[in-house]
Amino acid sequence: APQPDWWKASACYQIWPASYKDSDGDGIGDIPGIISTIPYLKDLGIETIWLSPMYDSPQRDMGYDISNYEAVYPPYGTLDDMDRLIKECHGRGMKLILDLVVNHTSDQHAWFSESRKGTANKYADWYVWRDPRVVDGQRRPPNNWSSIFGGSAWEYCRERDQYYLHLFAREQPDLNWENEETRRGIYKSAIEFWLDKGIDGFRVDTANMYSKDISFPDAPVRLPGEEFQPAFQYFTNGPRVHEWLKEQRQQVLDKYGDVLMVGELPDTEAAEVLRYVSAEARELSCVFDFDIVDLGTHKQAGGKKHHTTRHTLPEFKEAIRKVQDLIRGTDAWTTVFLENHDQARSLSRFATDKAEFREQAAKMLAVLMCCLTGTLFLYQGQEIGMYNHPTHWGVEELRDVDSLNAYGDVAARHNGDPLWLKKAMQGLQLVGRDNARLPVQWDSSPNAGFTTGTPWIRVHDDFKHVNAAAQLLDPRSPLNFWKKMIRLRRDHADLMVFGQDFTVWDYFDQDVFTFTKTHPDGGLKILVFLSFSDEVQPLHYPTGLDHAYKELMVSNVDEPGRYLSPWEARVYLIK
Ligand code: TEU
């Protein structure tokens, strides 16, 4: 039986299959490609792999639109390949978790094909159907909610003369969780099928959106003059979501031991997050909280991607404090992440991607992450310091439905005005999802060694400078630094993974981030200095610690001196 809470100290790595490693030259990553890199991941210190959706899918939203939970998208491989992947991971003492995407399916899923046919079949009530509203003799959607990917959250279906709800793309109809039969179907097909094969858990997509306000009220106007309005408050953390997550744990997951369920929890306040992750509630093991990665995006107010603003360092510190403090004095657990397939690259977003500072900054962020409390999640390519796509790339390089919709929206609204389109591209270059979806840069051969064919999305221009093969040979590379940090974190798990009393000492400093954490038994502390500056910065010891006995644990410079050099990081052990 698995160790209880095995996932707390586990170093996890997210693989996004399309862009990871292609083994057969079709330009799309695949499962045999993943298998070939397991020794690389093992060497990096990775203990758990999270594999993003590899299920069969028409790929309107890169596999988050699933047409069959029990089949693999053919370009990625077969069920046999998945069995082999599970075996290879377990053979090396690693765990594997998959993505659980059950807020919605693809409109090509057999359940939906049936459901849309009429109101009397077995699946008629498996999705969220509502009658049209009639306004001035015109057929309109049942309410004014906007979809997260833009436009109305409702799509008309002629066969039923009704609308179905889609919080995301129109090809992603929302499942009706209110129907018990639907829930059983989901548990059997999406969860038990894979746990029976031996996987160790799931990353739970939009874990807080299953339960909606089924009176479907109009949302208040946040964006004046627009027909469709953001309606997060009516579909996140709805009235029955906790009941269903408990049901799932008790009736399904408990049959399989300590299954890791790491939920994605957008748009949720701290107090509400605890209801999902307290050990007593037995719903989710831990969650991805969005306070850090949402900085500057104004998402709840219906902010648009091209209106993203750069946050300040004090705001960044505050967001981290919030997430670290969430579990203070509770039995709950949290995660540490700065990147995933929906986010820009952390170097560009939270540090710097200037050539002269990039490697130093990548190592500094490694120190930050490895010193935070929670389960650590790295995203593919983060370990080598991949950064956002160049600013001169045009919209023709983008593939993401969310980004393309956002761009299209600006184009339509402003009649293709080039200044507006430029602004749209600037926003997408900063936060667009394709930044994280460029092929992993394995070496300096054509296409960065990702594929021998034509890559489905453009390879970053800078792969000759930033690639895994070169970094493996360079003892000072971000990759080798990450290796060292992950080991250090393991060796000092009490302080680094489980440390408590996270305290920021320089809230208002715009250049330096200083914090401490304490051993759960008291006494030992770590003191962490991080520079977010292109210039040399003074070093201020927290009050009371200036004369304490300090032992340097790690640093990203050769000889840490009296000052902090640009993008320096250092960690002291205080006894
Ligand atoms: O994302 C859920 C989510 O809430 C989105 O709003 C996310 O913040 C979005 O990417 C912002 O642009 C999950 C998946 O991670 C994402 O890739 C999927 O597109 C989405 O669900 C639908 O399944």
Image: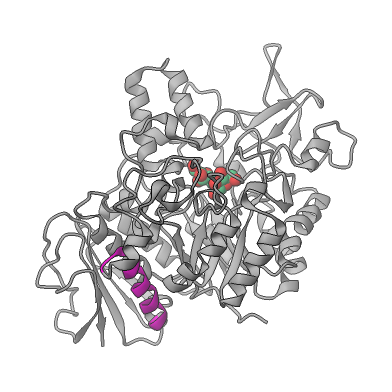
Which residue is pictured at 43% across the width and 52% down the height?
A: 449
Judged left or right of residue 76, residue 269 is left
Residue at the far top in the pictured view: 137
* Depth check, front residue: 156 or 224: 156
* Depth check, front residue: 277 or 9: 9
Give residue 413's position: percent from left, percent from top: 45, 19
> In the image, is residue 330 above or below residue 173?
below
What is the quadrant of residue 188 in the picture? Answer: bottom right
Reply yes or no: does residue 479 show up in magenta: yes
What is the quadrant of residue 143 in the picture? Answer: top right
Give residue 528's position: percent from left, percent from top: 26, 71
Image mark count: 0
Give residue 519's position: percent from left, percent from top: 37, 83
Q: Magenta region, mostly helix, strand or loop?
A: helix
Reply yes or no: does residue 88 show up in magenta: no
* Depth check, front residue: 482 or 537: 482
Does any portion of residue 535 appear in the rendered image?
A: yes
> In the image, is residue 160 above or below residue 2?
above
Which residue is pictured at 32% across the width and 63% down the height?
A: 471
What is the quadrant of residue 232 in the picture? Answer: top right
Give residue 122's position: percent from left, percent from top: 88, 42
Q: Quadrant of the N terminus?
A: bottom right
Specify how the rendered protein is coloured. Answer: one colour
Does any portion of residue 304 appear in the rendered image?
A: no
Region rendered in magenta: 476-492
Please state the quadrant of the image where ligand 1 appears: top right
Q: Quadrant of the C terminus?
A: bottom left
Which residue is pictured at 50% across the width and 73% down the height?
A: 10
Judged left or right of residue 115, residue 450 is left
Residue at the far left in the pictured view: 562
